[in-house]
Amino acid sequence: MSDETIALGYDKDPMTRDRSDDNVTDQWLRPLVGLVVVSGLCTTAGFAVYAALLPGPPPHPLALAVLCGSLVVANRVRVYVRVLSSGDSTTWGEIPVLIGLVLFPAPWVILCAVAAMALIRILDWRGLQKSTFAVAKEALTSGSAAAVFLACGVQPDLTRPDLPALPIVLALVTFVVVDHVIFAPVLSLATGTSVWKVAFHHWTSKVICYLGELAAALLVVGVLATGASAWILLVVPLVVLCMHLWQSRSVRTREERESWQRLAKATDELNAVDLTQVLHSATTRAAQIFSAAESAIDLAGRTVRATASQVLADGPRPPGGVTPPDETSVDLVAHDGSVRVGVLRLRFGGTVRLTEVEQYKLRTFASAVCTAIRNAQAYAELARIAAENAHAATHDPLTGLANRRRLYEQAEQVFRSTGQGLFALLLIDLNHFKEVNDTLGHAAGDQVLREVAARLRDSADPGDLVARLGGDEFAVLLTGLPTPALAGHRATGMLATLDATIEVEGMRLTVEAAGGIALAAGTGSVEELMRRADIAMYQAKRAGEPIVVYAHARDTADLERLMLTGELRRAVAEHEFTVDFQPIVDLGTGEVLAAEALARWHHPDQGSLSPVRFLETVERSGQLPAFADAVLEQSLIARQTWRDAGFDLPIAVNVSPRSLLDPTFPGAVLARLARHDTPADRLVLELTETLTVSQLDVVERTLAELRNAGVRLAIDDFGTGVSSLSVLSRIPVHQLKIDREFVAAVETSAEAAAVVRTTVDLARNLHLTVVAEGVESEPQRRALWALGCIAGQGHLFARPYSAARFAGMLQRGSGGRPGMLAAALHDEGSVVRLSARRLPNLPA
Ligand code: C2E
Ligand code: CA
Ligand code: CA
């Protein structure tokens, strides 16, 4: 006989709990229980009347008391297993009922069974409803067994009983069937499992137990009927005990296995990347697996509570109260106990002591939960970093605006998508920003840039994209323009927001800006749009106007440049760019120390073009990286051939300021060095001073990368820039190149000589080398040398030549000395003689 008190559970009792989502269940459960109780009472009343109507005296009270007693004992001995999830139990109450029906009139047996069950329920009180249900069920099950006996016409006799084997078998079967018919639907409703699953749960061990009960009943009745030795009866308790132990064990093992399987399934389910999902499934599963009324997980700053069926709360941990007495908690620690992420708490709604196995299971589960939480946390961290990187790749760290890359991407997208109305690019450059940086310092400059960025962002239309291109250059992609004229209107509005003074370190500054607008034609490229906005912006600057809209007519004023723009792509593809090399010479000895690469364009129509004619166009087109790459490549190849000829010279290559704003530039340079197996310190990059200080922070990073790799850096045309010293303080270089302007006047102007001298002194103090440019005469060479300048380049030594001619020159040398281009200065006599004789013979 199954025992419903366990099945219905302590806490899951469908008759007492109050769960709103179980309304449907309760709707069916209550009438069902009610029906059982009413039928049980009617059956009991019916049998009571029947007992009263029976002819003859009632059975001896002592005999009835023995029957009652054995019913109580048999019903109290339970195979009761509470293995983690749900319990199950079987009692041996059928045996005394069957034997009783052989010995006593059926009504008395039923009354005894009902009385015994009532007594048990009073002793083990669990509420009126449960108790009446149990008693009613007992009345119905044993009543049905009695009905079978009556139907089979079995005559009970206490003194000389028969052995009605078939009725006993039938009665037991009926007993079991009725028991399940009443019990299975109730349990099924209460637990939400199917009726079949409930009815056939552990069916093999149940059947074996029923057979055991049958055997015991038949044995007892057999002994009584045949008058065999009553000692045999002693075997009955033994058999029952053995059966009992066997069943206990098999049920326990099975439950144990199922519980481990549930645990394994639950830990599988924990393998999620979302922390919330992990916590919710861990808490609900914990409540299910450990049959807890409620479970909770506490992490730092977060608590999740759940029952077996739903999450109750998820949020910040409520202020700590007292731990309820029915609570068990376990630390969520890794297998090796190294990390603790939180606590898992279980509340049972009754005092429960976990067995050792259960505790082990709990720790295993806790460690699985710990791993899952850490995985989810690690995943979340990775996702966060990835998002941060994605943001950093497309945003300017100083102002938070989009960067150049993002602007290009967005502009390309707008170009591709048609039907979005007109759009335009507004380029904004701050006037005199350099002065802010130079006079107030870098931090103040940053503050101004941030404020400008904020104002531009706030004044932009929702669809517009405001970007910082670097330094003090901003750009706005104006989209969805109804008419072209509106672009100028909107841009004026944006620039007007910069009129209000900006307060920096207690000072009120006004920022002026020049803006250039280019309207996008239906087709075209982002580069072209950028170029046009750039031209317009420079026109605005030159004209002192706030805004200029690009006009083709004004652009054609620079006809040559425009014509060249279209040809640049071809020039790169057709290798029309070549490089000539000019030696850098030791002014004292005449030895060649290095070579400077100077670009040339062999134009099919215009012949050889010097850099001044095409450099600006190259810089403003998208071809700069390809051009710079071509120059570096040819320079490194030339260097290699000279080295193979025995002259291992460093090569100096000029770098456009714009290349330094390109974050891919250092990588490209280093890759080429590696490809040509050239040590980084054999490359000198010459930087022009025209870099504005506001661009320095971008440039600094680029240069640091190159410098750290070993590449040498030189400042070209030193002395002409306004802020030479401020550049030097920010960019650690290895070399200064004194501008031609000073060299040309070094003998005639005391001022020029002073510049050379201070530059040399500065270089000595900073441990830098100095090269004088444009040395055209022997007196200049002497004067420079006297001022302490060690190296120089210029027409005096050689003009720029092709790589092959340069090699020939090195090999010939001067005065039969390869690698020398002039006589040494310290040998006074020879210098005058040799140079006077040799120089005119140098190839022109
Ligand atoms: P720079 O770096 O100052 O180069 C020196 C310039 O002075 C060269 O002009 C050279 O031919 C010229 N020069 C050399 N010795 C003498 C002399 O004794 N007297 C006079 N009057 N001039 C002399 P070039 O080749 O026309 O180059 C002009 C500028 O173009 C260079 O000035 C450099 O800034 C730039 N440049 C040249 N090649 C490249 C390149 O590959 N990339 C970049 N970004 N710029 C380059
Ligand atoms: Ca140079
Ligand atoms: Ca120069």
Image: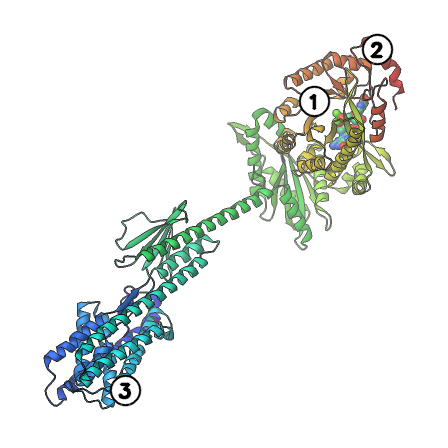
Of the residues tagged 2 and 3, which is closer to the observer?
A: 3
Mark pair 3, 1: CA separation: 119 Å
Left of 605 or right of it: where is 194? left
Q: From the image, which quarter does the N terminus lie in?
A: bottom left
Residue, disc 3: 166
Mark pair 2, 3: CA separation: 142 Å
**Residue type, label 2:** Ser
Residue, disc 1: 736
**Residue 735 image offset from top left, x and y in percent:** 69, 23
**Residue 292 image offset from top left, x and y in percent:** 32, 59
Label 3 crowd bin: few (<14), some (14–19), many (20+), radius 10 Å? few
Label 1 crowd bin: few (<14), some (14–19), many (20+), radius 10 Å? many
**Residue type, label 3:** Leu
Residue 780: in sight, yes or no?
Answer: yes
Residue, disc 2: 830
Of the residues tagged 3 and 1, which is closer to the observer?
A: 3
Mark pair 1, 2: CA separation: 30 Å
Residue 685: in sight, yes or no?
Answer: no
- Chain-order first, disc 1 or disc 2: 1
Write the residue at 83% across / 21% down.
Answer: 818
